Amino acid sequence: MPDPDAKWPENVGGKFYVDDQCIDCDLCREIAPDFFMRNEDGGYSYVYKQPGDQDGRDECLEALEGCPVEAIGDDG
């Protein structure tokens, strides 16, 4: 279960975020590349842009549901 208190600081404010459980599997970046980015130094993903339409929200939800370690959160 994602922990909002363990969000990476790079996450932009909004509904979706990635916490410190991320194992850098690349799944979220493959599913929703317009919203997730990799921190090269730390080896984890974070949300760099929040979706502005339903298609984007659907992509982020698909990434959330597919995350193998449940590191993607939805505050909405």
Image (tube, rainbow, N blue to C red):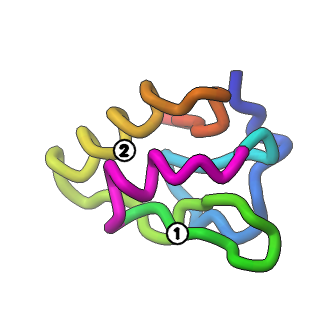
Residue count near mark 1 (Cα–Cα under 10 Å), binned few <14, some 14–19, many ≥20: many
Structural distance between the alpha carbons of marks 2 and 1: 12 Å
Give above or below for 29 relative to 67.
below
- Asked whether 67 falls inside the magenta stretch, the response is no
Q: What's the amino acid at mark 1?
A: Met
Q: What element carries label 1?
A: strand
Give above or below for 69 relative to 35.
above
Residues in magenta? 23-34
Residue plotted at (70% across, 30% down): 2
Residue 30, by quadrant, is: bottom left
Residue plotted at (49% across, 46% down): 15
Residue extending farthest bottom: 41
Nearer-the-camera pick, 52 or 44: 44
Give above or below for 45 relative to 19.
below
Quarter of the image with the N terminus is: top right
Q: Is residue 19 left or right of residue 17?
A: right
Residue plotted at (60% across, 69% down): 38
Nearer-the-camera pick, 5 or 40: 40
Residue plotted at (36% across, 35% down): 61
The image shows residue 39 at horizontal and vertical percentages of 68, 73
Q: Which mark is residue 55?
A: none
Residue 32, by quadrant, is: bottom left
The image shows residue 22 at horizontal and vertical percentages of 71, 45
Give above or below for 41 relative to 53.
below
The image shows residue 29 at horizontal and vertical percentages of 43, 58
Residue 58, by quadrant, is: top left
In this view, the mark in front (2 or 1): 1
User: Which residue is denoted by mark 1 in the rendering?
Assistant: 37
Q: Earlier in the sequence, mark 2 or mark 1?
A: 1
User: Which residue is denoted by mark 2 in the rendering?
Assistant: 60
